[in-house]
Amino acid sequence: MDEKLEALTKAINSTENLFGEQFNKHPDALYAYEIVFGKKELEETLASKNDLEYNAFYHASGCFERQIKIRAIPTDIAKFYIDKIIHPTRKNHMLLSLMETALERDEINEAISFINELVEDKFEIKHHGYRNLLNYYAKTGELVEFKKYLKLSKPAKSPRQNVVTSKFKFISNYADKNGTEKAIELLKDKSFGNKFCLATIENQAHKFTLSEITELLNKYPLFIEHDEFCKSWLLVRHFANQKPIQINEDEFEITISEILKVDKNLKRGDGRYRDYMLFDLGSSVEKIEQIKTCKKHTIAPFYKRELNYHIRNVEEKTKGNKV
């Protein structure tokens, strides 16, 4: 018997519907915490919390999942205790978490077997298990397996971004294994499309010269059609993928001039596209003047501060090397 997992399992079952003060005073919750962290830690934790009336002082199932990882507990032993969980929704979430751990350990068959044990009494959930498999094969870049689980992952169901992210990751790793041009050809498959074009090269950009990147963009117009400023982004990735790096002045000027063609107010996500590139380039180099050039053209105060911090680090490193 694993004393810690046994105590946590009991606490999960007996406190599932308890919150705040009720959870914090429950003997099973207190005992489990003491068994896992020790009596002294329990006393100090309780004494330090000012909001115990409203919030549980720890998450029992989260603690269970961390135990599996930090103690490298075998999957079958973890599964033995999860099978004791009496609340279907909680058990589902814990099975999905164990599935992720099994996949991290390359225990494919065990991970697949967990999907059939997910209970769909109120809500569909098995597609989340298939999304775990999809993400696994996205990392390996295996096309047949990825497509096998793509439809089962129900891409149209929320949150859809999970599947989109797996597709980006897959294309990137497929390109790493098979080459950028084969990955570009794969975009013709209806499962993907041109919106994933940057994934074919951005993580491989350091393998191309700046001239080769330009030639590739000229050969495949889909890149510019997707993002008219993708050349500047890919030139930056060429260097950022190799950070820290010494860049000769000619290549630095070529890259900066491309970045400055981007409208300073053009947004990507929550920030300015140009600021992202200036920061990535500036934080990749170790020539003070190049960093200052990037900072000069940056607008966001956050990135200016980060580049100042980078300048200080480089200066301290340079002083240390002279001693």
Image (spheres, helix red, strand yellow):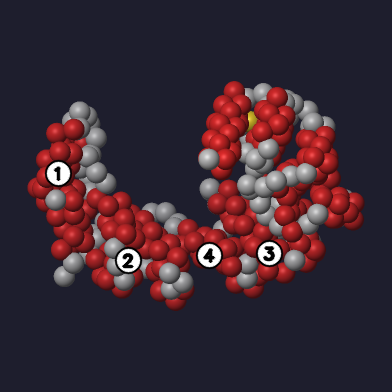
Q: CA distance from mark 1 to mark 4?
A: 37 Å
Secondary structure of the residue carrying numbered label 3: helix
Residue pointed to by mark 3: 176
Sequence-first tag of 3 and 1? 1
Secondary structure of the residue carrying numbered label 1: helix
Q: Nearer the viewer, residue 253 or 319?
A: 319
Q: Nearer the viewer, residue 238 or 76?
A: 238
**Quarter of the view holding residue 201:** bottom right
Image location (x, y in percent) of residue 52: 19, 33
Tags 4 and 2 in contact by the CB under 8 Å rule?
Answer: no
Sequence-first tag of 1 and 4? 1
Say which amino acid is labelled 2. Answer: Ala
Residue pointed to by mark 4: 136
Say which amino acid is labelled 3. Answer: Asp
Q: CA distance from mark 4 to mark 2?
A: 19 Å
Sequence-first tag of 4 and 2? 2
Residue pointed to by mark 2: 72
**Quarter of the view holding residue 47:** top left
Q: CA distance from mark 4 to mark 3?
A: 16 Å
Q: Using a 10 Å C-alpha cutoff, classify the residue at mark 2 as few (fewer than 14 neighbours), some (14 to 19) or many (20 or more).
A: few
Name the mark nearer the viewer: 1 or 4: 1
Residue pointed to by mark 1: 42
Image location (x, y in percent) of residue 312: 56, 31
Q: Using a 10 Å C-alpha cutoff, classify the residue at mark 1 as few (fewer than 14 neighbours), some (14 to 19) or many (20 or more).
A: some
Sequence-first tag of 4 and 3? 4
Tags 3 and 1 in contact by the CB under 8 Å rule?
Answer: no
Image location (x, y in percent) of residue 290: 71, 34
Residue at 24%, 35% (x, y): give it.
55
User: Which residue lies most toward the front here?
Assistant: 323
